[in-house]
Image: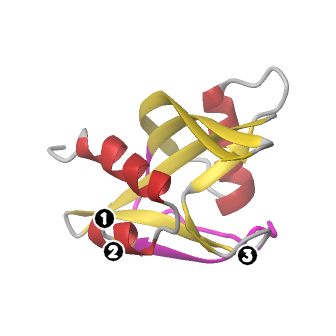
Amino acid sequence: MKRKVQAVIYKREDGKRKFLILHRKLHWTGWEHLKETMKQGESYEDTIRRGMKEEIGVTKITIEKGEKVNIPMNKNEEIIYAYLVEIGAKEEIDITKEKEHDEYRWVEKEEALKLLTYENAKVLLNKLSDAKETK
Protein backbone atom coordinates (compact mmCIF):
# COMPACT_ATOMS: atom_id res chain seq x y z
CA MET A 1 0.00 0.00 0.00
CA LYS A 2 1.37 3.42 -0.97
CA ARG A 3 1.19 5.88 1.90
CA LYS A 4 0.81 9.54 0.96
CA VAL A 5 1.07 12.88 2.70
CA GLN A 6 -1.06 15.81 1.54
CA ALA A 7 -0.58 19.59 1.87
CA VAL A 8 -3.21 22.31 1.90
CA ILE A 9 -0.98 25.17 0.71
CA TYR A 10 -1.76 28.85 1.01
CA LYS A 11 -0.21 32.30 0.77
CA ARG A 12 -1.34 35.70 1.97
CA GLU A 13 -2.21 38.20 -0.74
CA ASP A 14 -3.84 41.58 -0.12
CA GLY A 15 -4.77 40.51 3.40
CA LYS A 16 -6.55 37.36 2.23
CA ARG A 17 -5.52 33.75 2.09
CA LYS A 18 -5.26 32.20 -1.36
CA PHE A 19 -5.05 28.43 -1.63
CA LEU A 20 -3.04 26.53 -4.21
CA ILE A 21 -4.93 23.94 -6.21
CA LEU A 22 -3.31 21.78 -8.87
CA HIS A 23 -4.96 20.45 -12.01
CA ARG A 24 -4.11 16.78 -12.34
CA LYS A 25 -3.69 15.20 -15.77
CA LEU A 26 -2.01 11.87 -14.96
CA HIS A 27 -4.30 8.84 -14.24
CA TRP A 28 -7.34 11.11 -13.75
CA THR A 29 -8.32 14.70 -14.49
CA GLY A 30 -9.42 17.22 -11.89
CA TRP A 31 -8.34 19.64 -9.16
CA GLU A 32 -6.50 18.57 -6.01
CA HIS A 33 -4.13 19.55 -3.22
CA LEU A 34 -0.48 18.58 -3.50
CA LYS A 35 0.22 15.07 -2.28
CA GLU A 36 3.38 12.98 -2.17
CA THR A 37 4.14 9.29 -1.69
CA MET A 38 6.29 8.50 1.34
CA LYS A 39 9.64 6.81 0.86
CA GLN A 40 10.99 4.13 3.20
CA GLY A 41 12.18 5.68 6.47
CA GLU A 42 10.95 9.18 5.57
CA SER A 43 8.97 11.28 8.06
CA TYR A 44 5.66 12.93 7.16
CA GLU A 45 7.29 16.36 7.22
CA ASP A 46 10.25 15.26 5.10
CA THR A 47 7.81 13.77 2.59
CA ILE A 48 5.86 17.00 2.23
CA ARG A 49 9.02 19.13 1.98
CA ARG A 50 10.36 16.84 -0.77
CA GLY A 51 7.02 16.83 -2.56
CA MET A 52 6.78 20.60 -2.55
CA LYS A 53 10.29 20.93 -3.94
CA GLU A 54 9.75 18.28 -6.64
CA GLU A 55 6.20 19.16 -7.70
CA ILE A 56 6.00 22.94 -7.36
CA GLY A 57 9.63 24.05 -6.94
CA VAL A 58 9.17 25.64 -3.50
CA THR A 59 11.48 25.09 -0.51
CA LYS A 60 10.72 28.04 1.79
CA ILE A 61 7.65 26.91 3.68
CA THR A 62 6.06 27.19 7.10
CA ILE A 63 4.27 24.07 8.26
CA GLU A 64 1.51 25.32 10.54
CA LYS A 65 -0.60 22.33 11.41
CA GLY A 66 -0.53 18.63 10.76
CA GLU A 67 -2.76 15.74 11.61
CA LYS A 68 -3.21 12.06 10.98
CA VAL A 69 -5.94 11.25 8.52
CA ASN A 70 -7.17 8.07 6.87
CA ILE A 71 -8.30 8.84 3.34
CA PRO A 72 -8.43 5.80 1.06
CA MET A 73 -7.74 6.76 -2.54
CA ASN A 74 -8.00 3.37 -4.19
CA LYS A 75 -7.10 -0.18 -3.22
CA ASN A 76 -3.35 0.58 -3.41
CA GLU A 77 -3.05 4.12 -1.98
CA GLU A 78 -4.12 6.10 1.06
CA ILE A 79 -3.43 9.54 2.48
CA ILE A 80 -2.27 9.09 6.05
CA TYR A 81 -1.15 12.58 7.08
CA ALA A 82 -2.07 16.13 6.05
CA TYR A 83 -0.53 19.54 6.66
CA LEU A 84 -1.55 23.16 6.42
CA VAL A 85 1.43 24.90 4.80
CA GLU A 86 2.08 28.59 4.19
CA ILE A 87 4.48 29.82 1.53
CA GLY A 88 5.68 33.36 0.99
CA ALA A 89 3.61 35.59 -1.30
CA LYS A 90 6.59 36.08 -3.63
CA GLU A 91 7.43 32.38 -4.03
CA GLU A 92 7.19 31.24 -7.66
CA ILE A 93 5.36 28.01 -8.46
CA ASP A 94 6.97 25.81 -11.13
CA ILE A 95 5.08 22.71 -12.27
CA THR A 96 7.17 22.15 -15.42
CA LYS A 97 9.50 19.60 -13.81
CA GLU A 98 6.82 17.02 -13.09
CA LYS A 99 4.28 15.22 -15.24
CA GLU A 100 1.23 14.94 -12.96
CA HIS A 101 -0.14 18.49 -13.28
CA ASP A 102 -0.68 20.86 -16.19
CA GLU A 103 -2.10 23.91 -14.41
CA TYR A 104 -2.34 25.55 -11.01
CA ARG A 105 -4.42 28.33 -9.50
CA TRP A 106 -4.33 30.51 -6.40
CA VAL A 107 -7.93 30.84 -5.27
CA GLU A 108 -9.89 31.92 -2.24
CA LYS A 109 -11.32 29.17 -0.08
CA GLU A 110 -14.85 29.38 -1.52
CA GLU A 111 -13.58 28.92 -5.08
CA ALA A 112 -11.30 26.06 -4.04
CA LEU A 113 -14.30 24.32 -2.48
CA LYS A 114 -16.15 24.60 -5.80
CA LEU A 115 -13.22 23.40 -7.93
CA LEU A 116 -11.71 20.55 -5.90
CA THR A 117 -12.72 17.27 -7.48
CA TYR A 118 -13.06 15.01 -4.45
CA GLU A 119 -15.15 15.60 -1.36
CA ASN A 120 -12.35 14.47 0.97
CA ALA A 121 -10.15 17.29 -0.40
CA LYS A 122 -12.89 19.80 0.45
CA VAL A 123 -13.30 18.39 3.95
CA LEU A 124 -9.54 18.58 4.48
CA LEU A 125 -9.42 22.20 3.29
CA ASN A 126 -12.18 23.16 5.72
CA LYS A 127 -10.69 21.21 8.61
CA LEU A 128 -7.13 22.51 8.31
CA SER A 129 -7.84 26.08 7.22
CA ASP A 130 -10.53 26.85 9.82
CA ALA A 131 -8.03 26.54 12.66
CA LYS A 132 -5.98 29.43 11.21
CA GLU A 133 -8.74 31.84 10.10
CA THR A 134 -7.99 34.35 12.82
CA LYS A 135 -4.25 34.64 12.15
List the single residue furthest toward the top: 41
List the single residue furthest toward the bottom: 103
Which residues are drawn in magenta?
A: 85-106
Mark 1 is surrounded, within 10 Å at the Cα level, by few (under 14), some (14 to 19) or many (20 or more) other residues, namely some
Point out residue 37 in the picture as x, y percentages from the top left corner. Answer: 75, 42
Magenta span contains residue 102: yes
Q: Are marks 1 and 2 in contact (CB under 8 Å)?
A: yes
Mark 2 is surrounded, within 10 Å at the Cα level, by few (under 14), some (14 to 19) or many (20 or more) other residues, namely few
**Which residue corresponds to the image point at 42% horizontal and 47% vertical from the top-left?**
124
**Which residue corresponds to the image point at 58% horizontal and 45% vertical from the top-left?**
6
List the single residue furthest toward the left: 134
Count of labels in the image: 3
Secondary structure beneath label 3: loop
Q: Are marks 1 and 3 in contact (CB under 8 Å)?
A: no
Callout 1, which amino acid?
Lys
Q: Which residue is mark 1?
A: 109
Point out the tag, 1 or 3, that comes first from the N-terminus.
3
Magenta span contains residue 124: no
Q: Which residue is mark 2?
A: 111
List the single residue furthest toward the front: 75
